[in-house]
Image (cartoon, helix red, strand yellow):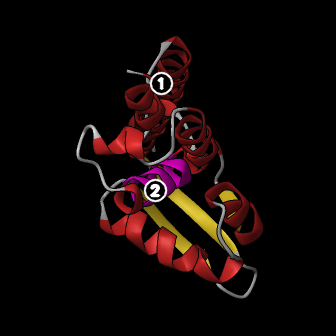
Amino acid sequence: LALLKIFQEGKLGDYYAFIKSNGGDTVLAQWDLSSEECVRYMRILSLCSLAADHEEIPYSVVAETLQTSPDEVEKWVIAAVSSGLLNAKMDQLQEKVLVERSVVRKFEMEQWKALQARLHLWKRNVGGILDAYKQSLEQPQQQ
């Protein structure tokens, strides 16, 4: 259950800590899981968690989170984008990941409130556009 929770909301460091404290790769063998595949999935999921909190992420921060070298960052961004969990671009000159959209791994009250705030803002903006459009329609009639 603890391992499942780590895959649901944890990061790579949490995964490594769990494996270390529970007997190494033998804990994975009981569920017929591959250590390499688990690490791969945890890196992708950790990148998505990072992307959910930031719009721009320096390669160095991604590399630190994924516990890999900065040279490997682009490979992991491509893997996350290919999996459909992340929509992002890479600025290779500034060495930044520019996040457009990311899957949220855990959706709780905080995320519901943020969604509500965004929807209210969207509703207000659309209302403003409609008001401006109505006014533009009325102006030719007044002339």
Residue 63 in the figure: left or right of residue 108: right
Count of picture labels: 2
Q: Amino acid at mark 2?
A: Val
Whole-percent x, y for residue 113 in the image: 53, 15
Displayed quadrant of residue 68: bottom right
Displayed quadrant of residue 71: bottom right
Residue 86 in the figure: left or right of residue 56: left
Q: Amino acid at mark 1?
A: Leu
Label annotation for residue 39: 2
Whole-percent x, y for residue 34 in the image: 32, 56
Q: What residue occupies the far left of the structure in this picture?
A: 32
Q: Which contiguous range is marked in magenta?
A: 38-48
Mark 2 vs mark 1: give the one in front: 2
Q: CA distance from mark 2 to mark 1?
A: 31 Å
**Magenta residues: mostly which secondary structure?**
helix
State the residue in front, 3 or 86.
3
State the residue in front, 76 or 98.
76
Disc 1 packing (10 Å; few <14; some 14–19; many ≥20): few
Displayed quadrant of residue 30: top left
Work out whether 17 lies above or below 99.
Answer: above
Work out whether 35 lies above or below 91.
Answer: above
Quarter of the rendering occupied by the N terminus: top left
Whole-percent x, y for residue 115 in the image: 47, 24
Residue 141 visible: no
Question: Which residue is depicted at the point 28% across and 49% down?
Answer: 33
The residue pinned by badge 1 equals 115
Work out whether 59 lies above or below 48.
Answer: below
Q: SS of the residue at dot 2?
A: helix
